[in-house]
Amino acid sequence: MAIIDYFLQLASSQAFTSTGLGLKSVDFGSVRQLGLIDEGLFLVVSVETAADSTTGDETYEFQIITSAAAGLGSPTVLNSKTVAAADLGKGAQVTLVTPMEGMKEFVGLNVVLGGTTPSITISAYLTSELPQANISYPAGI
């Protein structure tokens, strides 16, 4: 079972109804040793409230971004994944490999939503462990 380091958490039970950033960024200029950091990290997004698909035109994209600024201004997208709303039910996980090449001091999450009524609640974190064995539960359980 993975242990989630609070300092590597990018979103915690965060609701999105439009495109936006996770509430936190990770400062790789001050973060402690992450283990196999040279081999890359994983971004794990855990769905706590299923993605809305009411009108059928909703889109959901998760981006791992990097910037020289803590507020993630002028970010560079390191990796992204678009996922169908049908695949974003409660408890679902989305995993992205976070490449180390091109990484600046700060890393964060950008959630790009589109369509008429997109909404989703997620938690997200970085880890050096393979996330396949992780089980996601909403906060407070």
Image (spheres, helix red, strand yellow):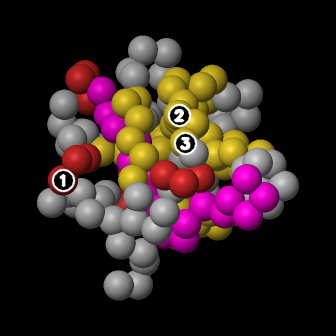
Q: Going by the image, does 101 lie left or right of 116?
A: left
At horizontal 35% and vertical 84% (from top left) the residue drawn is 141
| Callout 2–callout 3 Cβ contact below 8 Å | yes
Tell me which label, 2 or 1, sits earlier in the chain. Answer: 2
At horizontal 25% and vertical 22% (from top left) the residue drawn is 38
Local SS, label 3: strand
Local SS, label 2: strand
Label 1 crowd (10 A; few <14 / some 14-19 / many >=20) = few
Q: Quadrant of residue 32?
A: top left
Q: Which residue is mark 1?
A: 133
Q: In the rendering, at what x and y percent does residue 89 appear?
A: 49, 63
Tell me which label, 3 or 1, sits earlier in the chain. Answer: 3
Q: Residue furthest front?
A: 56
Q: Which residue is mark 3?
A: 83
Label 3 crowd (10 A; few <14 / some 14-19 / many >=20) = few
Residue type for callout 1:
Ala
At horizontal 73% and vertical 64% (from top left) the residue drawn is 54
Q: In the rendering, at what x and y percent does residue 119 appear?
A: 69, 62
Image: magenta residue range:
40-56
The answer for how far apart the CA atoms under marks 2 and 1 are is 20 Å
- Of 72 and 140, which appears nearest the observer? 140
Q: In the rendering, at what x and y percent does residue 59 appear?
A: 69, 45
Residue type for callout 2:
Lys
Local SS, label 1: helix
At horizontal 61% and vertical 40% (from top left) the residue drawn is 61
